[in-house]
Image: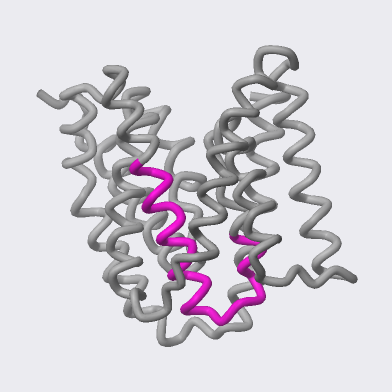
Amino acid sequence: MFELSIQMLAIAFVVVCLGAILQTLSGFGMALLAAPVLVLIDSEFLPAPILALGFVLSLFNATRLRAHLNIAPIGYALVTRAIGSVLAIGLLSIMPIDWLITGFAILIIGTVALTLKTVNIQYNRRNMMIAGFLSGVIGTTTSIGGPPVAMVLQNSPLQQARAHLSLFFLISTVMSLILLSATGNFSAHQVELTALLLPALVIGFVCANAMSARFKPQYFKHLINIVSVMASLFLLAKTWVI
């Protein structure tokens, strides 16, 4: 049975709805927006429920944008993500996690700064492979692996970028959920928490679709950069302040 108050449920509902809007418009960001609030409400919201909600949202978006999908570059990124994840496990055994998180956060902020001034990151196989690798390392060590892939796609056509991000997160979250389930880290209570917030996810998805027509392509790169910097600042604050 749920032990959350009506007020806490309302807050959880709102942040998941807003997170779904953000991710549907930008391609990623729901976990960044919702996870810090949900974990304060009930620690059981992480990691499985937020991953499960992300899977459902990615499925919605990938299905909606299926005409714009190209599986090949995403496949390369997923392979290198797996390699990055394995490397991250090794790094965690020899290096303090605070150093890794700080280094990655600074790298993301620096990359955003360069893209605003001089560097134009192109969407191609090589860059997707690099982004997938970095996403694996960062995602495994910090649970926020979206920025590298999103930044490679920021100059792509809007619908194509959204579609590729949705497919990338759809497959990567399946991998994570299978691992969590196989190791007994997706409890019945967490399944209930996931089901409880599915209506909020659907409402956010529907609202974002209504807003999508007014979301101009030139907004996309700015939103990607803003969300990436927000993720980096959150990681720094979580590591050194909170």
Q: Of 224 and 167, which appears nearest the observer?
A: 167
The x and y percentages for residue 167 are 41, 60
The x and y percentages for residue 161 are 52, 71
Q: Which residues are magenta?
A: 150-174
The x and y percentages for residue 61 are 34, 66
Reply yes or no: does residue 160 show up in magenta: yes
Residue 98 occupies quadrant: top right
Q: Of 139 and 90, which appears nearest the observer?
A: 90
Residue 63 occupies quadrant: bottom left
Residue at 35% over, 58% down:
58
Residue at 39% over, 63% down:
21
Q: Of 67 and 114, which appears nearest the observer?
A: 67
The x and y percentages for residue 180 are 33, 26
Q: Of 179 and 191, which appears nearest the observer?
A: 179
Q: Is residue 54 above or below residue 224?
A: above
Reply yes or no: does residue 45 show up in magenta: no
Residue at 23% over, 45% down:
197
Q: Is residue 4 left or right of residue 123?
A: left
Residue at 36% over, 75% down:
65
